[in-house]
Image: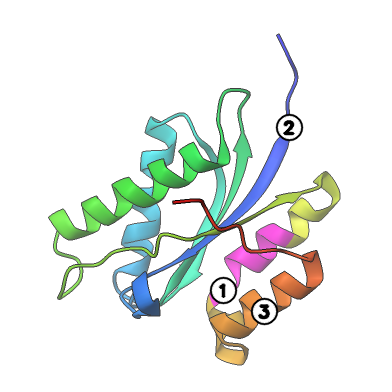
Amino acid sequence: MPYIRVWVHFVWSTKNRIPYLSDPIRPIIFDHIRENAAKKNIFLDEVNGYVDHVHCLVSLKQTQTIAQVAKLLKGESSRWINQNQLCSTRMSWQKEYYVVSVGERGIKRLREYIRNQEAHHRRQSFDREIQELEETHGLVRFIEPH
C-alpha cells in the first residue's frame, strides 16, 4: 500500500462574486461541505471563507484528482444550498477555482489563515487576496480548451 500525503488549498467563489454567504448561513454551508466531504471520502482538514468565497484544505488520496474533488465539493454544495433555499435567489459557484499544493511546513499557517477569513477580509478584499496569491505563487490561469 502506498503512503501518500498531498495537501492542496482550494479556493472558489460565488458566480459574479455575489455575496450569497451571509453570516447566518455561512456556518451551515461550511458544516454541510464538511459532512459531504466525509461521505465522499474526501479528507477535508479545514473549510471556511467569507461572503463570496470558500477556502478548503484537503489531503488528496491516491485515486483522487483535483478536478474530481472540486466537482464533488462545489457541485453538491450549490445543489444543496438551492434545494434548501438558503439564499433568496438561485446561488451558483463560478466555474473557475484556485488550487495550489501545500508543503507540510505550511499546513499550520494555512489552517490559521483559513480559520481567520472573516477578520482577514475586514482588511483585504477577495480580489486583492487572489492577486497576492497569484504573485506569491507565480500562478498562471489555466484555460481549458473548448
Residue 107 is tagged as none
Please rate how many residues cluster around mark 1, counting C-alpha atoms within 10 Å: few if below 14, some from 14 to 19, many from 20: some
Q: Observer-nearest residue: 29 or 143?
A: 143
Q: What residue is shown at x 30% (from left), y 75% (from top)?
A: 20
Q: Return the residue found at the far right.
A: 105
Q: Which residue is mark 2?
A: 5
Tell me the kind of residue under disc 2. Answer: Arg
Q: Is residue 114 above or below residue 67?
A: below
Amino acid under disc 3 = Gln
Tell me the CA gap for discs 3 and 2: 28 Å
Q: Which residue is mark 3?
A: 131
- Circles 3 and 2, Cβ within 8 Å, touching? The answer is no
Q: Earlier in the sequence, mark 3 or mark 2?
A: 2
Specify start and end residues of the magenta stretch as a single range: 110-117
Residue found farthest to the top:
1
Q: Residue placed at 28% from the left, 56% from the top?
A: 78
Residue 31 percent across, percent down from the top left: 38, 53
Give the percent coordinates (x, y) of residue 55: 54, 61
Name the residue that disc number 1 marks. Answer: 117
Please give the name of the residue rendered at 56% of the width and 73% of the height, measured from the top-left corner.
117
